[in-house]
Amino acid sequence: MPSGELRQSDCSEDEAEQWLWAQIKAEAKRDAESEPALASYLYSTILSHSSLERSLSFHLGNKLCSSTLLSTLLYDLFLNTFSSDSSLLAAAVADLRAAHERDPACVSFSHCLLNYKGFLACQAHRVAHKLWIQSRRPLALALHSRIADVFAVDIHPAARIGKGVLFDHATGVVVGETAVIGNNVSILHHVTLGGTGKVGGDRHPKIGDGVLIGAGATILGNVKIGEGAKIGAGSVVLIDVPARTTAVGNPARLVGGKEKPSRHEDVPGESMDHTSFLSEWSDYII
C-alpha cells in the first residue's frame, strides 16, 4: 500500500470518500502548479468542485456528451444518481483505490479519475445499471452506447459489477447482459464475458470475488469462475473453474490437472500475479 494511504477497513465509507477527495484535490493543485498548461483543465474538472461525485459527474458528462446528448443533461443525470445512492460513490472510491494499489503505472488518484477509461467506463456503467433496474431502459441503452463509443468498453447495462474492480487498459472488454462480476476483481484488455449462442435467459459468466482475468481471455456461457481463481491471458474457458485454481490455454486446462489442481493462497485479483503458475506448467516451452 502506498505510503501514507488510509486503510479502508479503518474508516467509514464517508471518511474514506472525504480522505480520497482531499488527496485528489491536493494532487490536482500540485499538478496545476507544476504544469500551467493543465491549470484550467484541472480547475474545471477537479478544483472547482466541492465533492468527488460532482467532479466525477462533470467529467463523465463531458466525456460522454454528443451533439444531441448534452453534457448538462448528463451531468444532472450522473449527479442525481450518485447523490441518491451512496453505494455507487462507495464503489467508485473502492475502484479508485484498486487502480492505485494494483497498477504501478497509476501515478496518482487524480490521474485515474481523469484518464483511466476503464475506471470511467465502470462508473458510467453503474449509472446505466441503476437506470436499467429502474425500468428506464431506453436511457440506459443510450448511455451504454455512448460508453462503448467513447471508451471502447461494452458492458450491457443489466450486468452486475461489484466494487474494488479494476479494468486495466480496458480496450475491447465485452461483458454480456446476465454476467456478474464480484468484488476485488481485476480484468485486463480484450476480455470477453459472453454467451454461447442466441438462446436467451441466464447465459453469461459469473465471476467470483478476487478473480484475475488475463488479457484476451474469453469466458463463454453461464459458467462460474470460483473465488480467487486465475484465468491466463488468451485462454478460452467454457466450463466452471474451481476457486483458487488457475486455468490456462485454448481450451483452458487447470494447472496441476483436473483431478488435483494446484491451488494458490493469494488473491490474484489483488496481487495481479499473472505468471507464478509457470513453475508448475511442465510443458511450457520457448
Image (cartoon, rainbow, N blue to C red):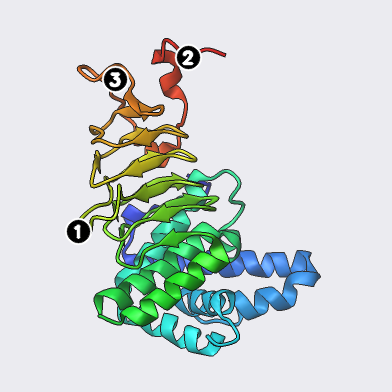
Where residue 151 sits, quadrant-wise, is bottom right
User: Which disc, if any, is residue 284?
Assistant: 2
Compare marks 2 and 3 and give the one earlier in the sequence: 3
Q: CA distance from mark 3 to mark 1?
A: 33 Å
Give residue 206's position: percent from left, percent from top: 26, 48
Q: Is residue 240 above or below residue 83?
A: above
Mark 3 and mark 1 in contact? Answer it, CB < 8 Å: no
Instruction: Identify the residue shown where x is 62% and y is 52%.
Output: 107
Give residue 51's position: percent from left, percent from top: 48, 78
Q: Is residue 68 left or right of residue 270?
A: right
- Tag count in the figure? 3
Is residue 113 at least partly visible in the picture? no
Q: Secondary structure at mark 3?
A: loop
Which is in the foreground here, disc 2 or disc 3? 2
Q: CA distance from mark 2 to mark 3?
A: 16 Å
Q: Which quarter of the image is occupied by the C terminus?
A: top right
The kind of residue tagged 3 is: Ser
Is residue 201 at least partly visible in the picture? yes
Give residue 258's position: percent from left, percent from top: 24, 20
User: Which disc, if any, is residue 122?
Assistant: none
Q: Label 1 belongs to which residue?
A: 201
Compare marks 2 and 1 and give the one earlier in the sequence: 1
